[in-house]
Amino acid sequence: MTKHLNHMDPEDALYASAREFGIPKLAKARGLSPESLYQKFDKSNHRNHIKFGEELDSYLDQFRAAEVPNWDLALVALCFRHGGIFVRLPAVAGDGDLRDTCTHKLLGALKEFSEFTAEVAKSVEANGINATELQRIQREGADVITVVHQLMAWAEKVHEDGRHGRLRVVG
């Protein structure tokens, strides 16, 4: 029987990628036998198991509990290093008038998108993108992605709360 993998669990996700790569091929590339590599992915093997997520989690939990403003900076850097973006989803409330809340969220998304496009346009006008401009563009782009994810999380919360009323677009 095949074990169900939770792709939101770091060790399970790593194992899923390793299986797609090929365990024998990965083991050879890392100087291990396939059996040794399988043992590293076996969570019941407490001696050799890969536990990279646990240590990182302990630091992040401590930083968040202490209310360190950028407690998730290591995740941001790790995701960026591997071509991704970490998006922290805030707690979402479905309170208030749906139309007002939706309008507010959409305006926030438009604001972030306009700041992103302004940074890109400013760089294009200068006939090139230097390192500082690239960092600003990347930061603004990440903000756009974040606000879109927040809007999606809000919509999901409204749906889960059973508020299925129609929103009328005015304009």
Image (cartoon, rainbow, N blue to C red):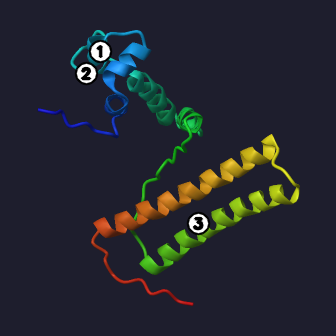
Secondary structure type for disc 1? helix
Residue at point 26%, 15% (across, down) = 39
Distance, label 1 to label 2, CA atoms, is 16 Å
Q: Mark 3 highlights which residue?
A: 109
- Judge by depth and name the residue closer to the eye, 71 or 15: 15
Using the image, determine if residue 102 lies above or below residue 143.
below
- Judge by depth and name the residue closer to the eye, 103 or 66: 103
Q: Mark 2 highlights which residue?
A: 43
Residue 118 visible here: yes
- Few, some or many C-alpha atoms within 10 Å of disc 2 (few <14, some 14-19, many ≥20)? some
Using the image, determine if residue 123 lies above or below residue 4.
below
- Few, some or many C-alpha atoms within 10 Å of disc 3 (few <14, some 14-19, many ≥20)? many
Q: Mark 1 highlights which residue?
A: 34
Q: Say which of marks 3 and 2 sits in front.
A: 2
| Residue 126 location, quadrant | bottom right
Quadrant of the image for the N terminus? Answer: top left
Do residues under tags 3 and 2 come within 8 Å of each other at their CB atoms?
Answer: no
Which callout, 3 or 2, points at the residue further toward the start of the chain? 2
Residue 97 visible here: no
| Residue 156 location, quadrant | bottom left
Distance, label 3 to label 2, CA atoms, is 41 Å
Do residues under tags 1 and 3 come within 8 Å of each other at their CB atoms?
Answer: no
Outermost residue to the left: 1
Which callout, 1 or 3, points at the residue further toward the start of the chain? 1
Amino acid under disc 1:
Pro
**Residue 114 x %, y %:** 69, 66
Using the image, determine if residue 170 lies above or below residue 114.
below
**Residue 63 x %, y %:** 51, 31
Residue at point 47%, 53% (across, down) = 90
Amino acid under disc 2:
Lys
Secondary structure type for disc 3? helix
Distance, label 1 to label 3, CA atoms, is 48 Å
